[in-house]
Image (tube, rainbow, N blue to C red):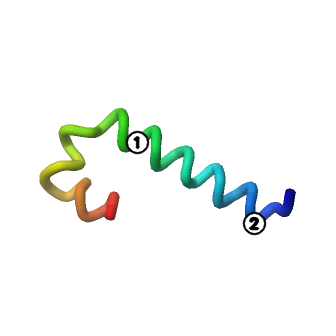
Amino acid sequence: MGKKKQLIQHIRLVLSNLGKDFNSEIKSGVLQLIYK
């Protein structure tokens, strides 16, 4: 697997984990803008 694909997978995993951890915060406020 190329380093670029691996990096993209890691970023997706981090975003997924952030989505789970900060679900209520993401639905309103600044974190929603960052998440999008």
For residue 18, above or below residue 8: above
Q: Quadrant of residue 30?
A: bottom left
Quarter assignment of residue 22: top left
* Cβ atoms at labels 2 and 1 below 8 Å apart: no
Q: Position of residue 14 (x, y in %)?
A: 52, 45
Instruction: In the rendered view, tell whether residue 17 sits above or below residue 29.
Output: above
Labelled disc at residue 4: 2
Q: Position of residue 27 (x, y in %)?
A: 17, 49
Query: Which numbered disc flags the more N-terminal residue, 2 or 1?
Result: 2
Left or right of 11: which side holds 35? Answer: left
Q: Residues within 10 Å of mark 2 (few under 14, many from 20)?
A: few
Could you tell whether 1 is left or right of 5 in the image? right
Residue at the image point whose x is 64% and y is 60% from the top: 8
Query: Which residue is pictured at 86% across the width and 57% down the height?
Result: 1
- What residue type is disc 2 on? Lys
User: Marks 2 and 1, Cα distance to the nearest angstrom?
Assistant: 21 Å
- Element under disc 1: helix
Q: Residue furthest top?
A: 21
Q: Nearer the viewer, residue 34 or 36?
A: 36
- Residue 25 spot, x, y in % from top left: 20, 43
Helix, strand or loop under label 2: helix
Q: Label 1 crowding class (10 Å Cα cut-off): few <14, some 14-19, many 20+?
A: few
Farthest-out residue, right:
1
The residue at which mark 1 appears reads as: 18
19 relative to 29 in the view: left or right: right
